[in-house]
Amino acid sequence: MQTPRRRPPVVGTMTRTTELRQLHPFFVGELSGVDLRALDGGGIDEMRALMDRFAVLVVREQPFDDAEQVAFARRLGGGEIVTKVGRSVIDHAARLTEPGMTDISNLDEHQQIIARDDRRRMYSLGNRLWHTDSSFQEPIARYSMLSAKEVPRVGGETEYADMRAAYDALPAAMKAEIEGLRAFHSIIYSRSTIGFTDFSDAERALFPGAEQPLVRVHPGSGRTSVYLASHASHVIGWPVPEGRILLRELTALATLPQFVYRHTWRAGDFVIWDNRCTMHRGLAFDEATQRRDLRRVTTVDVAPAAARA
């Protein structure tokens, strides 16, 4: 199903040695032979066009430091960075100090592996649920960009699901049923589903939640997608049990194997995804003995995707 298909080299403001191939029949492009830090304005425009097409881009051998990663994210994503996300919300001795950088690791501020019962680890387990970043905030997130510094020998992959292809495959009756519906998204809710309720009043106040449409039209590609996440608590105007059943049914359909790409990380990988038309989740690894250091920057969707009225 995921046999790579060679594409012509990317030209224009990227180098002629840059190669692009598709890693999944529906989405996910892989770029090699390019240094993203060196792109000019035209190269950034090309990257946005590739994101509209593929929704997920894997770029190999990108030696970003934290400040360079944040600077690139601002260029690609429109300038504004999501800051109230991730482990930093509950981590008062943060390992990473660059503003806007989210720590996706199992390491503490002393670069040591976090204990299995550490509050930070328990909170981060929610990343194993299918989600899209910052759907519980308004405006939502546009791009997330994850840089791999250290990866475990086995496990710890990230899976991505194409919400455009998932929408296309829905039965006509289901499309009609969800047209115009809105769901309430809350990170407090999604963490509670795995038993993490250890939020202070101050932390809870940071995240009042947000309503989001179940169907969106992407402004770059013009394609329609479902907009789902484990953060989706209930459907507005529906009885809570019925709404949650609908959301779970949609998530099950949208994450069928034919819509999913699994990324096996290498040190130096840089993966960008569009939160407006994808979901993702992290997979398990031996956190007690294996180090994993991934660093993410997420940009705000300053020109939000059009919602179905």
Image: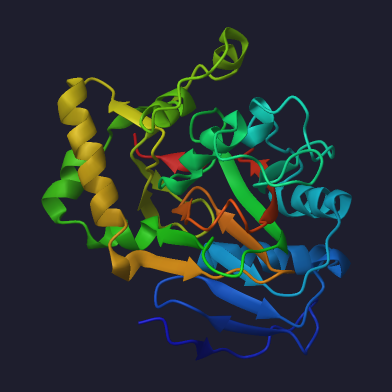
Q: Is residue 223 above or below residue 236?
A: below
Question: Which quadrant is home to the C terminus?
Answer: top left
Give the residue displayed 38% in from the left and 38% down from the top. Answer: 230
What residue sits 84% from the left and 37% below the top? 97
Query: x%, y% of residue 100?
Result: 76, 38
Q: Position of residue 6 (x, y in %)?
A: 55, 91
Q: State the residue at coordinates (61%, 33%).
A: 120
Mark yes or no: residue 134 visible: no
Q: Is residue 82 visible?
A: yes
Q: Nearer the viewer, residue 270 or 237?
A: 270
Residue appearing at x 57%, y 57% in the figure: 273
Q: Is residue 70 left or right of residue 153?
A: right
Q: Quadrant of residue 268?
A: bottom right
Query: Measured from the top left, where is residue 101 in percent x and y?
Result: 75, 42
Classify 91 as above or below 131: above
In this view, the residue in front, 62 or 177, is: 62
Quarter of the view holding residue 47: bottom right
Q: Nearer the viewer, residue 49 or 230?
A: 230
Q: Closer to the camera, 64 or 140?
A: 64
Q: Position of residue 34 (x, y in %)?
A: 78, 77
